Image (cartoon, rainbow, N blue to C red):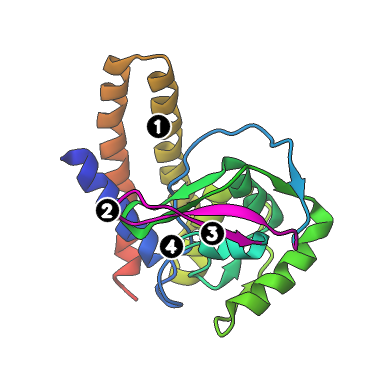
Amino acid sequence: MKCLLLACLCFFLSACSGQNESESTASNAAIVTTPKPDLTRRAEEVFSFTLLPPTGNINQTRQGDSADLLLSIPYFFSSGLIPPDFVVNEILATGISDAGMSGGVKWKPYALAVDQFPVLHSLLKKKAAPRDLHYRQPPEWVSNFQDWHVWVFYIRNGVPWKQHKKLNDIVYNLELQIEAARKNHDEKRVQELNLELIKAGENLVEFTMQYIKKR
């Protein structure tokens, strides 16, 4: 029950990050460490990916390019911002974005070369219309999806990024430790870490909501 509560709180928190635009910045579903993919694609290259339904097990296969795939990820562009290239490639390398009751997408992991991102930006802006997507260069401290998510909270909701990043990193690192413990079949450690994660998640939500409620 506590894990379900934490999941609901974190989902609500995520949904508030882009509330001035529509919904949220991105799905935080793929908290995993992934190797660099062997496959590289061009931005306009058409390939198959699978849309995951909110409920049931009837998946839908779709043909599209990288812009179509990214636009199919729940909440990824709800802030109106196009993520930087390293964030996009971090997500593409996972091969899946599952937002639970909001659905998701699954694809073969790949990467886009740096020279493909101007093409990707053009495709996204064209296909997202009438939504207004634009790119904004993040500061140097933003080095991954987690940091970018924190930065979006800062520019959209005024959440102080240093403390937010500190609390968010604690949650993220605990999730990585849980993943490692599960791989080692250490259920006792998983339970211990889950208790720490609940408390850390509550601290994160409590800190962030005090700024979101003011808006």
| Image position, residue 41 (x, y; %) | 76, 51
Q: Earlier in the sequence, mark 2 or mark 4?
A: 2
Element under disc 3? helix
- Residue of label 2: 9
Q: Give the spatial CA distance, label 2 vs label 4.
A: 17 Å
| Image position, residue 207 (x, y; %) | 33, 54
Q: Give the spatial CA distance, label 2 vs label 1.
A: 17 Å
- Residue of label 3: 151
As shown in the figure, which amino acid type bears the numbered disc 2? Answer: Leu
| Image position, residue 28 (x, y; %) | 44, 50
Q: Write the start and end of the magenta stretch as one range.
A: 44-64
Along the line of sight, which residue is nearer the eye, 105 or 145? 105
Q: Is residue 203 above or below residue 64?
A: above
As shown in the figure, which amino acid type bears the numbered disc 1? Answer: Leu
- Check whether the beta carbons of the residues at disc 1 and disc 3 lie within 8 A of each other: no
The disc label shown at residue 174, or none: 1
| Image position, residue 70 (x, y; %) | 58, 60
Element under disc 2? helix
- Residue of label 4: 159
Along the horizontal axis of the image, is 26 left or right of 116? left
Q: Earlier in the sequence, mark 4 or mark 3?
A: 3
As shown in the figure, which amino acid type bears the numbered disc 3? Answer: Trp
Name the image quarter holding the N terminus: top left
As shown in the figure, which amino acid type bears the numbered disc 4? Answer: Val
Q: Give the spatial CA distance, label 3 vs label 2.
A: 19 Å
Along the horizontal axis of the image, is 78 left or right of 135? left
Residue name at image x 74 percent, y 35 percent: 38
